[in-house]
Image (tube, rainbow, N blue to C red):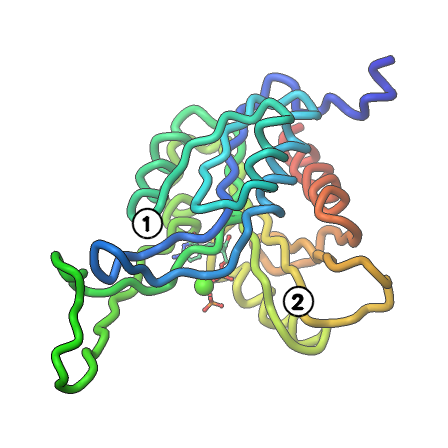
Amino acid sequence: ALALLGPADLAGRRVVVTAGGTREPLDPVRFLGNRSSGRQGAALAAEAARRGADVRLLAASVDEVARRTATAAGVAVTDVTTTAELRDAVRAAVADADVLVMAAAVADFRPAAPATGKIKKDGGAPPTLTLVENPDILAEVAADRPHPRLVVVGFAAETGEPEEVLALGRAKARRKGADLLAVNAVGTDRGFGDVTNAITVLDADGEVVGSGAGTKAEVAATLWDLVADRLR
Ligand code: CTP
Ligand code: CA
């Protein structure tokens, strides 16, 4: 019966997955954000839970489908909004974790000084937004690990021809220092029909260690196979 449920190769492991997109306040009612639904991250969290892991999802404004995917699989969900909140939540959660998967779309920049009151039209020139760069959560954790056995995994969506995507992914893998970087080629039709996700997984040296395509759940299964290899 167990075999029918699939591998339990993550039994006893503590897994932290980030999902969704961080939002940075402009003023008390407005933010700078992105369109990430959190569904790939939720699929990753759910698949880890099915394989026996104790999973926490750090959810940055995920949609309802993503939330249900996670909770239905028994994943514990912690909601966050800004990159600073996500960073604090990641730091706290990885202290006793075996794996961190950064599937969230983290805002690269934030307004330097959010307005304390609602920004008003005053008939003058439109306001100019001054942005500052956010910390790179993935690179920080990879460089300063709470303990050496933590496996750190990143996700990168890139556009372009397959060779360009691979070159961008290789450079990013080497820059980030994560153990694995899943590179998702977006906007390319690879002839899989309805299949919308294809990942190539690179190690910290930028070498290809695996690949997979299919639904978000299938992509998640491919990634966990590779992570489970690293945990053994
Ligand atoms: N990431 C992060 N903190 C940031 C930005 C990105 O932890 N401030 C993580 C993402 O969660 C993802 C990985 O880094 O796992 C790759 O994100 P991506 O946006 O592709 O990389 P960037 O370094 O931000 O480069 P780019 O200029 O291509 O956006
Ligand atoms: Ca980015």
Q: Residue at x 26, y 56 (%)?
A: 29
Badge 1 crowding class, 10 Å Cα cut-off, few under 14, some 14 to 19, many 20 or more, is many
The disc labelled 1 sits on which kind of residue?
Thr
Q: In terms of image quadrants, where is residue 87?
A: top left
Position of 156 with respect to 109 (left or right) is right
Q: In terms of image quadrants, where is residue 50?
A: top right
Q: Residue at x 61, y 41 (%)?
A: 65
Image x and y of residue 41, in percent:
58, 44
Along the viewing direction, whichever of 127 and 118 lies nearer the viewer: 118
Q: Which residue corresponds to mark 1?
A: 82
Badge 2 crowding class, 10 Å Cα cut-off, few under 14, some 14 to 19, many 20 or more, is some
> Quarter of the image containing the C terminus?
top right
Q: Which residue corresponds to mark 2?
A: 186
Image x and y of residue 6, in percent:
81, 25
Position of 3 with respect to 136 (left or right) is right
Image x and y of residue 107, in percent:
39, 59
The mark that comes first in sequence, 2 or 1, is 1
